[in-house]
Image (tube, helix red, strand yellow):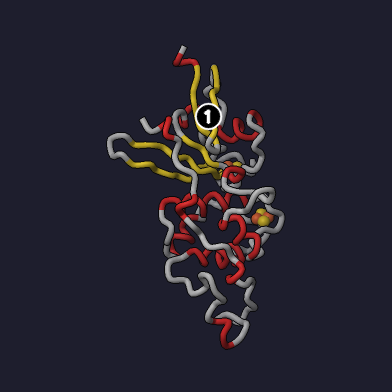
Amino acid sequence: NATSQIVVYVNGKEVIERQPDPETTLLYFLRNKLHLTGSKLGCGEGGCGACTVMVSSYNREEDVIRHVAVNACLTPLCSVAGMAITTVEGIGSTRTSLHPVQERIAKAHGSQCGFCTPGFVMSMYTLLRNNPTPSEEEIEAAFEGNLCRCTGYRSILEGYKTFAKGCCKKGKTCCQNEQNTDNEQGSPQLFDASEFTPLDPSQEPIFPPALQV
Ligand code: FES
Ligand code: FES
């Protein structure tokens, strides 16, 4: 009967889970049942952000769609029934094309071992879905739940701050490069922002109409 199954959309595709186990986490479901292993199991207790995915839901009373970055390791599968899940596989890949959020962390050298990268990508992606022109402070705040043990964060933050409102690096080489190749701390520039694909928010997947009820 209808109570013994739940429906979620994962990367735009309907998934029906019959007799869902209330103890199954969203991360376990994604990795072990759907074989979407881009989302990583780091700590398993909400501390590292490697498992971050975007959960989108429709609020009928306010007639709005909300996008939230969640730790899939802490999220019971049953709690996202009727919602749309977007994982790192759902936004782009090297086989098709990279999403600007994926491209910029790579070109800015913000990925070393890569274990944390899907989590950073999905935190940044969720922020941009809610606000395509965030401030630098909003970008920093979006990563409060993401840990990286390799990069020291500078490359991740500098790459992603190119999405910030008013960033001089948008679509052209940073103005700091005009005089010399060092930034204000005297460190060499990590990347050439003119190589970055611009973000086009109109190209994002739509919320599944079947869930907009
Ligand atoms: Fe570390 Fe989920 S695996 S927060
Ligand atoms: Fe290794 Fe972030 S790149 S943990």
Q: Residues within 10 Å of mark 1 (few under 14, many from 20)?
A: some
Number of numbered discs present? 1
Residue 181 spot, x, y in % from top left:
62, 82
Residue 103 spot, x, y in % from top left:
62, 58
Could one spot residue 48 in this view of the protein? no
Q: Please indicate whether residue 85 sits to the left or right of residue 105 in the image.
A: left
Q: Say which element carries label 1.
A: strand
Tell me if residue 174 comes above or below residue 16 in the rendering.
below
Could one spot residue 49 in this view of the protein? yes
Q: Which quadrant holds the C terminus?
A: top left
Q: Residue furthest right?
A: 113
Of 53 and 11, nearer the camera is 11
Taking the image in four quarters, ligand 2 sits in the one at bottom right
Q: Amino acid at mark 1?
A: Glu
Q: Residue furthest top?
A: 1
Q: Residue at x 58, y 71 (%)?
A: 194
Residue 70 spot, x, y in % from top left:
50, 42
Tell me if residue 66 comes above or below residue 79 in the rendering.
below
Residue position for label 1: 14
Q: Please indicate whether residue 97 sits to the left or right of residue 71 in the image.
A: right
Q: Please indicate whether residue 112 sits to the left or right of residue 207 in the image.
A: right
Picture quadrant where residue 87 is located:
top right
Q: Residue at x 42, y 31 (%)?
A: 211
Picture quadrant where residue 3 is located:
top left
Of 129 and 4, nearer the camera is 129
Of 78 and 173, nearer the camera is 173
Q: Residue at x 60, y 47 (%)?
A: 50
Tell me if residue 167 comes above or below residue 212 in the rendering.
below
Residue 112 spot, x, y in % from top left:
70, 58
Tell me: is circle 1 under 8 Å from ligand 1: no
Q: Please indicate whether residue 46 sits to the left or right of residue 208 in the image.
A: right
Q: Residue furthest left?
A: 61
